[in-house]
């Protein structure tokens, strides 16, 4: 996550959204669901905790090749995401990024109410959970007792810069997030130390240059090594132990920002009464509906006999799910089976006719 | 086949017969070696297949390439002898290889 992206997470809520379908997760399966639903005249709102779309494809392997997308002999993770965005563009999906769906409850009229941690509320007829392995969340370094410091001395993101004014800050990591925050927080910190395991940085060259300049001016300390222990009491960190090539050192600091990338954690989905089985949502293989009528699950998050966690399986699931959703959204309309090749009706929706 | 020994943090160890051409990570997963998680399935995108190569084998196994070095930034307690096991190809020369599984994979 780059800094500017992190900042935009404070987007102001715009009142409750009322819609037919909310898709939780903007991974490849959530994106393709927009297409299949769109062909059936169903509009989608898509929510993701990441600041960008594409799920695992764009977060974990944007530049790596995928070879098993039907009809695309080779495509990168980002390439597939871009193609999907192009494909669903005619249906004008609305994206709500940088926010996590926290609660999902059924209303008396049978619809669902959802709310995100950014304060956005939704009321929808149908929910499609396309949440993959769960929410992308910052990795927690496995330091003993680190939990006790989280939220008081240890932070994985910066919500308000002002909270860091006058602090003695340790930033740990060598990528863009770490370096961006070194550059932004240095002017307001009392002291700032950057810790990285090697004197080589993955971050953009110009940020590395700026960081090195600050180090040479004595405004930032650069330590090569790894943090092995946090010291303090009652959530107040006072120092951290640093393991270096040639011994140990104690770094005095009251605030630490570790940046070790993102990992997928199931998150709030566990609390939605979906009868999870080994962190997956059991569904039938006809409609991919969960134990709760009106809540569907597609892609990596679902489970059924023979499930394969492949993108192409999720695409198939999206198509079948949509048929059932149509029944809920337009209970009185008969659904005609049509090909995109030959149906003038479908082609009009796609904007090609 | 090449024999690979995985030593756990508690000192216990497991030997596996690995097929040349496979990776050390794949050989570990096929044999259910604890502590090798390999969340990304070998794409050098997760750093949860981290191992320490025994000092006697470091030269033969070689050093990580740039992409693997970058990914090692996401591993915990990285050392000189750290490698991502999905990036080590098993060869006949590696018959007898010894690697240690770290305490934690993050
Ligand atoms: C390195 C690697 C290589 C791979 N190679 C292939 C391949 O070659 N072929 C193949 O078919 N598959 C491959 N896969 C697997 C493939 O990427 C997944 O099957 C696919 O991404 C699943 O898509 P999805 O849409 O179900 O979920 P994901 O891509 O996991 O996306 C789910 C999204 O939901 C969001 N989310 C979850 N919960 C919430 C919440 N409560 N609020 C807001 N947002 C939430 C997450 O942040 C995430 O962005 C690979 C995976 C990896 C890691
Ligand atoms: S298996 Fe993910 S980096 Fe090796």
Image (spheres, coloured by chain):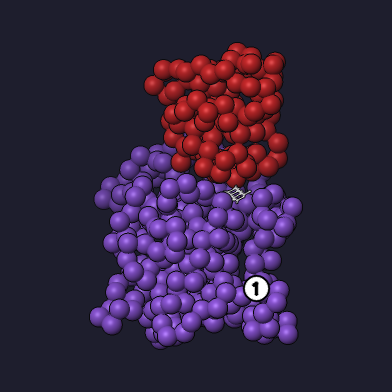
Chain colours: A purple, B red
Q: Position of residue B20 (x, y in %)?
A: 67, 22
Q: Does residue B42 show up? A: yes
Element marked by disc 1 = loop
Q: Is residue B33 above or below residue A28?
A: above
Q: Is residue A274 above or below residue A348?
A: above
Q: Position of residue A207 (x, y in %)?
A: 67, 58
Q: Is residue A288 above or below residue B63?
A: below
Q: Residue at x 57, y 17 (%)?
A: B17
Q: Quadrant of the C terminus of chain A?
A: bottom right
Q: Chain of mark 1?
A: A
- Quadrant of the rendered image containing residue B90: top right
Q: Does residue A24 show up? A: no
Nearest the eye: A321 or A114:
A321
Nearest the eye: A161 or A129:
A129
Image side of residue A55 versus residue A65, left or right: left
Image side of residue A207 versus residue A248, left or right: right
Q: Residue at x 37, y 51 (%)?
A: A279
- Quadrant of the rendered image containing residue A38: bottom right
Q: Residue at x 42, y 52 (%)?
A: A303
Residue position marked by numbered label 1 in the rendering: A339
Image side of residue A214 versus residue A266, left or right: right
Nearest the eye: A317 or A221:
A317
């Amino acid at each position: 996550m780059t800094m500017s992206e992190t900042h935009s997470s404070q987007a102001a809520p715009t009142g409750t959204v009322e819609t037919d379908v909310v898709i939780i997760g903007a991974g490849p399966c959530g994106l393709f669901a927009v297409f299949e639903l769109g062909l059936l005249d169903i509009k989608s709102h898509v929510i993701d905790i990441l600041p960008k779309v594409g799920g695992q494809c764009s977060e974990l392997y944007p530049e790596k090749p995928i070879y098993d997308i039907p009809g695309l002999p080779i495509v990168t993770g980002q390439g597939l995401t871009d193609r999907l965005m192009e494909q669903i563009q005619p249906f004008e999906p609305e994206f709500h990024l940088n926010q996590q769906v926290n609660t999902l409850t059924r209303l008396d009229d049978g619809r669902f109410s959802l709310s995100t941690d950014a304060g956005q509320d939704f009321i929808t007829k149908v929910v499609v959970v396309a949440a993959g392995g769960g929410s992308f969340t910052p990795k927690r370094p496995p330091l003993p007792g680190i939990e006790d410091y989280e939220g008081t001395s240890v932070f994985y993101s910066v919500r308000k810069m002002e909270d860091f004014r006058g602090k003695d800050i340790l930033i740990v990591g060598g990528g863009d997030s770490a370096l961006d925050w070194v550059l932004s927080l240095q002017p307001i910190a009392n002291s700032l130390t950057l810790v990285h395991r090697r004197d080589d940085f993955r971050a953009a060259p110009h940020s590395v240059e700026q960081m090195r300049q600050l180090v040479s001016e004595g405004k930032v300390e650069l330590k090569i090594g790894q943090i092995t222990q946090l010291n303090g009491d009652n959530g107040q960190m006072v120092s951290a132990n640093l393991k270096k090539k040639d011994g140990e050192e104690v770094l005095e600091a009251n605030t630490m920002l570790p940046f070790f990338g993102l990992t997928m954690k199931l998150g709030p989905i566990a609390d939605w009464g979906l009868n999870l089985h080994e962190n997956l949502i059991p569904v039938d293989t006809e409609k991919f509906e969960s134990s709760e009528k009106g809540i569907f699950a597609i892609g990596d998050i679902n489970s059924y006999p023979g499930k394969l966690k492949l993108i192409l399986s999720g695409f198939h699931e999206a198509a079948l799910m949509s048929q059932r959703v149509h029944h809920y959204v337009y209970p009185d309309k008969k659904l005609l089976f049509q090909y995109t090749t030959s149906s003038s009706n479908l082609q009009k929706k796609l904007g090609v006719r | 086949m090449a024999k690979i020994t995985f030593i756990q943090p508690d000192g216990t160890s497991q030997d596996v017969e690995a097929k040349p051409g496979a990776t050390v990570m794949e050989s570990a997963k096929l044999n259910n070696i604890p502590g090798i998680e390999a969340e990304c399935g070998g794409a050098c995108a997760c750093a949860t297949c981290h191992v320490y190569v025994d000092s006697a084998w470091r030269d033969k196994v070689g050093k990580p390439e740039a992409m693997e070095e970058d990914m090692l930034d996401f591993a915990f307690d990285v050392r000189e002898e750290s490698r991502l096991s999905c990036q080590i190809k098993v060869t006949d020369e590696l018959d007898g290889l010894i690697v240690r599984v770290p305490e934690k994979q993050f």
